């Protein structure tokens, strides 16, 4: 499958507004997270925009955050939060939904960011970095969406299961952290067992959803973790 980024078809209006503003500061940030991944594989809807600092003075970063707040403010109540190296601009909408833009300092990078096909000037994480970050999230938190994303990447033949682990290992090395695959696989297995307890297959009402969940869980055990646990 072609690994070149393509403009996602289902970007939300707020994501578009945010990305267009970020494109004006393309040298300061690179888009990651689910939105970044959707440029390479768009298989599920997502709204929030996550980005990495690419450099620049603190004053430039502060100006970028201020501008994102300004373009979001007409659409709802905006607040800003920060912790560690992360800054989050959060928008509460009148219909009870929310949107957020989050930017953090990058701990490691495997490849240079690339030009996004839209909007002009926007920088996008490489597929390698997006997948490595996704695998880091899978090992650390193991949310259902992390399992689905890893599975979807392999089903689409963008990467093989072994390549997912190789990228995770490379990212850990670049960040100066240990990369024990057996320990990581044990963590993934533990996350999956938690999901299975909370949402057992027999408790899923929809037959289609039940089959999909069963296939995904079997893939994790028999393919993604094969030989590791």
Image (cartoon, grey):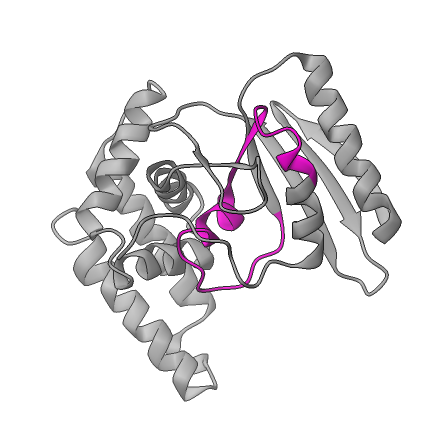
* x, y percent for residue 22: 65, 36
Outermost residue on the top side: it is 57
Outermost residue on the front side: it is 120
At a point 74% along the width and 33% down the height, the residue shown is 81
* x, y percent for residue 165: 24, 42
Does the magenta run of residues contain 32?
yes
At a point 40% along the width and 73% down the height, the residue shown is 200
* Start-end of magenta stretch: 21-48
- The one nearer the camera, 137 or 36, is 36
- The one nearer the camera, 38 or 34, is 38
* x, y percent for residue 74: 88, 49
Left or right of 62 on screen, residue 222: left
- The one nearer the camera, 148 or 210, is 148
At a point 48% along the width and 86% down the height, the residue shown is 205
Left or right of 165 on screen, residue 187: right
Q: Based on the displayed image, in which of its 4 quarters is residue 150 positioned?
A: bottom left
At a point 21% along the width and 51% down the height, the residue shown is 161
Q: Relative to 109, say whether 122 is above or below.
A: below
Left or right of 135 on screen, residue 227: left
* Quadrant housing the N terminus: bottom left
* x, y percent for residue 14: 71, 53
Asked whether residue 103 is in view, the answer is yes
Asked whether residue 177 is in view, the answer is no
């Amino acid at each position: 499958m072609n690994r070149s980024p393509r403009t996602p078809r289902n970007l939300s209006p707020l994501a578009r507004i945010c990305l267009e503003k970020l494109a004006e500061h393309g040298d300061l940030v690179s888009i990651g997270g689910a939105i970044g991944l959707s440029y390479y594989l768009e298989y599920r809807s997502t709204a929030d925009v996550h980005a990495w600092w690419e450099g620049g003075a603190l004053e430039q970063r502060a100006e970028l955050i201020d501008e994102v707040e300004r373009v979001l403010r007409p659409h709802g109540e905006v607040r800003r939060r920060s912790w560690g190296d992360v800054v989050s601009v959060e928008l509460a909408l009148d219909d009870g939904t929310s949107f957020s833009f989050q930017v953090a300092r990058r701990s490691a990078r495997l490849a240079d960011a690339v030009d996004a096909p839209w909007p002009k000037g926007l920088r996008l994480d490489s597929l390698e970095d997006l997948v490595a970050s996704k695998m880091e999230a899978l090992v650390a938190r193991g949310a259902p969406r992390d399992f689905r994303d890893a599975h979807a990447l392999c089903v689409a033949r963008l990467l093989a299961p072994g390549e997912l682990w190789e990228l995770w290992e490379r990212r850990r090395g670049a960040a100066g952290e240990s990369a024990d695959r057996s320990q990581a696989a044990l963590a993934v297995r533990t996350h999956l067992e938690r999901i299975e307890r909370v949402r057992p297959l027999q408790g899923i009402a929809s037959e289609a959803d039940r089959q999909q969940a069963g296939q995904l869980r079997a893939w994790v055990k028999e393919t993604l973790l094969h030989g590791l646990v």
